[in-house]
Amino acid sequence: MKQRSRRFIAVDVLLLVGAILPLVAILVLKALITPPTNGIEITGALVYFTFPTPIQPLPVTEAQVNSLAVIITILFLCLYMTHGIAAMPSTKRQLIAEWIVEKCCSMVHNNMGEYFGGFAPFIAAIMGLSAFSSLLSLLGLFPPTSDMNIVAGWAILVFGLITYYKFKAGPLKYLKSFAEPVPFLAPMNIISEVATPVSMAFRHYGNILSGSIISVLIAAALGGLSKLVLGWLPGVLGDFPFLRIGIPAVLSLYFDIFSGLLQAFIFATLTMMYIAGGFPQEAYEKRRARRREKKKAKEQAKTESV
């Protein structure tokens, strides 16, 4: 029993190390590659490496590396939360894991219906990836959600799912939907269809980026105000930004934590609404029923001919 217990603890430690190590790695990478700056600067994602390709150079940016680190961290956290899982919960982490699963399943069921019950892992992955990516700013790292390329990739993936489920009732039904309620609104409906991923991407990206910029600008302003008001203090005290103590941390509670988690929830909710709302379930069921009838009729015809 002791040997098994030690092995269990050892695996737990390895899983936690696997979750923390990617974050440490990107912290070290940022410290080694980030060029020195004078004061506060607002820049985009750094380009770490560039690989030559036949078409054009392929840059590997800070946003891509940080996003990969978040994915690996979430993977090891999931493995840690489910390690030693049993039919009867015996650990707090299993209770937390079951609570998360129940909440995600309930949210998907309430917003999408029973047909989309299998979407719970996908929605949980979107929320987890978005939330953890935004929370990287608490470590002084570039949040991938502040890069339009990352968020646009998520939006395009969701748009592909939306289009796939709209096609479930048949291509003709999908094309006819652009002429509803009247044919002359077809151009507006087409624009609305294309605007779906654009609005999802810009909403998420804009809110996270604006929060980061506002936090940096306020920190810079407080540093200047501190020097203006308290610059008369002798020596090092006059250069120390006293007004930056505490106030940026309070603002961070909103811009980095609350806003990041809220945007993750909104993006996941919009994903559920657009996919479920675009799926013509009644027309799909009728189409399936017609196909079954045709298949049954063919089988009967074959039987009679034999």
Image (tube, rainbow, N blue to C red):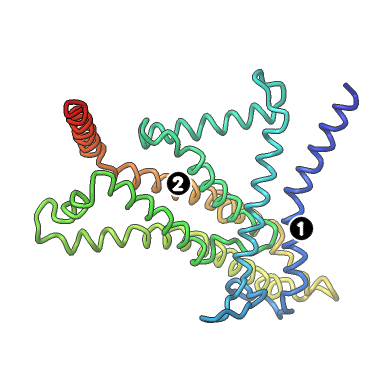
Mark 2 is surrounded, within 10 Å at the Cα level, by few (under 14), some (14 to 19) or many (20 or more) other residues, namely many
Residue 172: x and y in percent read 18, 51
Vertical side of 201 occupied by 226: above or below: below
Q: Which amino acid, by three-letter code, is at mark 2?
A: Ala
Residue name at image x 62 percent, y 53 percent: 135
Distance from Cα at disc 2 to Cα at disc 1: 28 Å
Q: The C terminus appears in which quarter of the rendering?
A: top left
Question: Would residue 261 be found to the left or right of residue 11 on screen?
Answer: left
Q: Which amino acid, by three-letter code, is at mark 1?
A: Val
**Residue holding disc 1:** 24
Residue 79: x and y in percent read 68, 39
Vertical side of 113 occupied by 136: above or below: below
Residue 296: x and y in percent read 22, 29
Badge 2 vs badge 1, beta-carbon distance below 8 Å: no
Q: Quadrant of residue 95?
A: top right
Residue name at image x 58 percent, y 76 percent: 58
Q: Can the viewer see residue 98?
A: yes
Residue name at image x 58 percent, y 29 percent: 99
Residue 25: x and y in percent read 76, 61
Residue name at image x 23 percent, y 61 percent: 190
Label 1: element kind:
helix
Q: Quadrant of residue 113?
A: top left
Label 2: element kind:
helix
Dot 2 or dot 1, earlier in sequence: 1
Which of the pair 144/301 is nearer the observer?
Answer: 301
Which of the pair 217/226 is nearer the observer?
Answer: 217
| Residue sitting at the far right | 2
**Residue holding disc 2:** 268
